[in-house]
Amino acid sequence: VLVTGGSNGIGLGIARAFASAGAHVTITGTKSAASDYGHDLAAFAYQQLDVRDAAAIARVAASLGALDVLVNNAGANFPFQPSEWDPDVFEDSVRVNLFSAWRMSLACKPLLAKSELAGGASVINLASMASFRAVPIVPGYGSAKAGIVALTRNLGVQWARENVRVNAVAPGLTDSNMTTPMKSFPAIEAAEMAKIPMGRRGVPEEIAPAVLFLASAQASYVTGATLAVCGGFAAS
């Protein structure tokens, strides 16, 4: 299993769940070594990766001897100055959140197509509630995440006969490094919480089981789908 951005947040929760299920898990992060993080990543193989770097994506994919599951989790948003309303920042956000998933999926496809995993190999992309509604503070992020849903459909159809299923999980508001700054803006936090029927944030450990399901033989007839894990947000 390869989990991009698996060094923190939702990605780390996913990586831990796969490792607990017995998988050999490689994670990527932006720091030079796993030991540079303030939490234990010893359970995983680690590779430094800036997902905006096409050559680095190719290097990571080429370094893997085999692959059954790719989780395109790495992402970021840029709500503050310069914000994503700046064209260059908007473009950078789309590069981080959409282009990287496209490039990594294509780079890993030859290995995935050779997988003997029951139910077939899987690419699982991380979408967002921003895939489906306006989030004006991060227009580039929202546009990229909408693109992730469309990318998932297209790859799911294109690779359906090649032993590679492609699905996505769309988390709701979940505790992570990306969403922690929102707590400093009580009005924004309260507005988001008011839209969640369950009335709380999720945690990474609640996102990971959906990813494991989509990668399992129990989901062998599922491809091109996006599964919302959002406390009811998408239904409200």
Image (tube, helix red, strand yellow):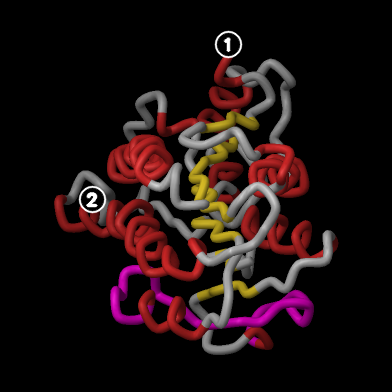
Q: On the picture, is 87 further left or further right than 220? A: left
Q: What residue type is labelled 2?
A: Phe
Q: Residues within 10 Å of mark 2 (few under 14, many from 20)?
A: many
Q: Residue beneath label 1, please?
A: 236
Task: Tell me, yes or no, whether the highlighted magenta stretch contains residue 66.
Answer: no
Q: Quadrant of the N terminus?
A: bottom right
x and y percentages locating residue 201 in the rendered image: 69, 35
Magenta stretch bounds: 36-56
Q: In which quarter of the image is the C terminus?
A: top right
Residue occupying the point 58% across, 55% down? 121
Secondary structure at badge 1 equals loop
**For residue 29, what is the image quadrant?**
bottom right
* Numbered badge on residue 140: none
x and y percentages locating residue 232 in the rendered image: 65, 19
Residue occupying the point 60% across, 33% down? 221
x and y percentages locating residue 154 in the rendered image: 34, 39
Residue occupying the point 54% across, 49% down? 124
Q: What residue type is labelled 1?
A: Ser
Q: Residue beneath label 2, please?
A: 90
Q: Residues within 10 Å of mark 1 (few under 14, many from 20)?
A: few
Q: On the picture, is 68 further left or further right than 141? A: right
In this view of the protein, can residue 13 be seen by the observer?
Answer: yes
In this view of the protein, can residue 172 be seen by the observer?
Answer: no
Residue occupying the point 28% across, 52% down? 94
Secondary structure at badge 2 equals helix
Specify which label sits upstream in the sequence, 2 or 1: 2
x and y percentages locating residue 177 in the rendered image: 59, 57
In the displayed structure, 34 sits above or below 211; it is below
Front residue of 205/160: it is 160
